[in-house]
Image: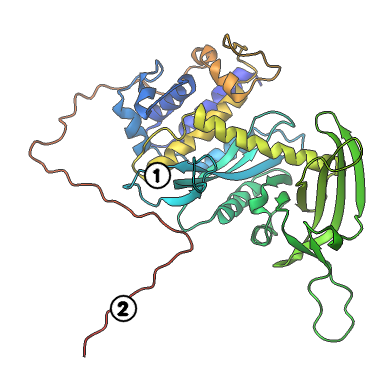
């Protein structure tokens, strides 16, 4: 199929799945692609492709209802089935420390905070993305959802992985950071048709398979202890490979099988120790990388650790969404508006991915030419093909001027909501009658 026709059909399908306020929302996305710098949400209304008034930007986010399930199926249809599908999951924070009238704010981890602890007040968002290339910064989100005040990053990731894996045409490989390398995540995803490759913290303690039952007493659940930061507890590796990497230099990978978490004895996994070596064979870093594979068939030893490096593409997408797509710029007033605005980020990213073969490389005077265009470079040149693609949005209809606020009507102050502390509950005081 022609690339232009494919992109036009994709945009038409997106338009149908926006439900209410389709026209204003679709023009808002086009304005988002063309606006490189924006200090507020109203700045997007100044784009030449947004044919409505600036107030329609806020009304669109108030009225639109994107169908996430249908959009996820549309994204999956764009994934080629010739190669193994590689997914990556992670979560990030949308900092809103001064929005005291915003409901359901929680304490979120934010390493970019200056001074003090790396904690901010705002929203956390969990993302499950398809990583299309072995190298590069492309990560295409399939689900990008807010972590509610009654959910955790692990429970949200389990729900997303369950929803996506049931729609995939083949068994995928999912990549996860060390926060997900724990027994609860392994137990809750044990029945899903997807392999998992997780990073482990270097201070964990794992356990081997128990010995054969001797016939007396209760059968053992755990075997010998395997502490990652204590080499005296390690058994002989099942496999050891040394290879020369063109970028990282000499690498050594050791593999142990049939290990498990203490709270997950029924789910065994293969543990890998990846080390960078100097010329004399010593370790080049103080903390090597520990990986755990849980699934049916693990890739080769020389391939599996390189597959995990593709997980960092989702970090590039978070930076791209916050800096170029202005994801965290708007000061929206309700959780629903924040969710609907966040639903537009995957849609815009997928349009850039489908248009990467159409745009010409036009670097700015201070930019270097690239062999493969990044999402930022495609967005920089997207305006050259937007006129060719057209828009399914209908032109606006003049409806007169709003009468505005009624004179003499009092304005009520907005409700201030406390910050939610997850895992913390206050004791309920019951009223007692005096004697």
In the image, residue 296 sits, relative to residue 33, either above or below, namely below
Camera sees residue 123? yes
Camera sees residue 392? no
- Label 2: few (<14), some (14–19) or many (≥20) C-alpha neighbours in 10 Å: few
In the image, residue 30 sits, relative to residue 295, either above or below, namely above
| Residue identifier under label 2 | 430
Q: Nearer the viewer, residue 286 or 73?
A: 286
The image position of residue 91, as x and y in percent, is 56, 45
The image position of residue 46, as x and y in percent, is 36, 19
- Secondary element under disc 2, as helix, strand or loop, is loop
Question: The N terminus appears in which quarter of the rendering?
Answer: top right
**N-terminal label among 2 and 1:** 1
- Label 1: few (<14), some (14–19) or many (≥20) C-alpha neighbours in 10 Å: some
Question: The C terminus appears in which quarter of the rendering?
Answer: bottom left
| Residue identifier under label 1 | 97
- Chosen colour scheme: rainbow
């Amino acid at each position: 199929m022609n690339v232009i026709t494919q992109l036009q059909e994709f945009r038409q399908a997106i338009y149908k799945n926006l439900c209410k306020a389709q026209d204003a929302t679709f023009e808002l996305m086009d304005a988002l692609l063309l606006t490189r710098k924006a200090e507020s949400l109203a700045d997007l209304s100044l784009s030449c492709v947004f044919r409505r008034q600036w107030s329609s930007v806020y009304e669109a986010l108030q009225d639109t209802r994107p169908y996430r399930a249908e959009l996820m199926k549309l994204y999956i249809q764009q994934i080629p089935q010739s190669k193994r599908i590689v997914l990556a999951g992670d979560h990030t924070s949308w900092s809103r420390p001064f929005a005291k009238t915003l409901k359901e704010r929680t304490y979120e981890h934010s390493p970019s905070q200056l001074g003090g602890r790396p904690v901010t007040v705002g929203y956390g968002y969990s993302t499950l993305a398809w990583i299309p290339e072995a190298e590069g910064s492309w990560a295409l989100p399939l689900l990008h959802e807010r972590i509610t005040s009654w959910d955790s990053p692990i429970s949200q990731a389990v729900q997303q992985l369950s929803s996506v894996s049931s729609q995939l045409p083949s068994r995928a490989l999912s990549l996860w950071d060390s926060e997900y390398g724990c027994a609860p995540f392994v137990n809750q995803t044990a029945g899903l048709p997807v392999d998992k490759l997780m990073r482990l913290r270097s201070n964990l303690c794992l356990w081997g398979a128990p010995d054969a039952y001797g016939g007396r007493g209760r059968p053992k659940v755990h075997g010998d202890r395997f502490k990652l930061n204590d080499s005296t507890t390690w058994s002989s590796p099942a496999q050891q490979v040394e290879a020369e990497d063109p970028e990282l230099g000499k690498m050594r990978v050791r593999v142990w099988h049939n290990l498990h978490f203490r709270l997950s004895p029924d789910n065994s996994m293969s543990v890998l120790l990846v080390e960078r070596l100097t010329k004399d064979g010593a370790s080049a870093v103080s903390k090597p990388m520990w990986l755990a594979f849980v699934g049916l068939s693990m890739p080769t030893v020389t391939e599996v650790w390189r597959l995990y490096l593709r997980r960092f593409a989702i970090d590039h997408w978070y930076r791209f969404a916050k800096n170029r797509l202005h994801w965290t710029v708007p000061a929206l007033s309700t959780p629903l508006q924040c969710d609907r605005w966040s639903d537009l980020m995957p849609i815009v990213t997928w349009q850039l991915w489908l248009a990467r073969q159409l745009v010409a490389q036009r670097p700015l005077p201070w930019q270097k030419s690239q062999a493969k265009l990044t999402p930022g470079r495609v967005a920089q040149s997207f305006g050259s093909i937007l006129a060719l693609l057209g828009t399914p949005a209908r032109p606006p209809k003049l409806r007169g001027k709003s009468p505005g606020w009624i004179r003499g009507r009092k304005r009520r102050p907005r409700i201030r909501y406390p910050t939610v502390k997850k895992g913390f509950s206050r004791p309920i005081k019951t009223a007692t009658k005096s004697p």
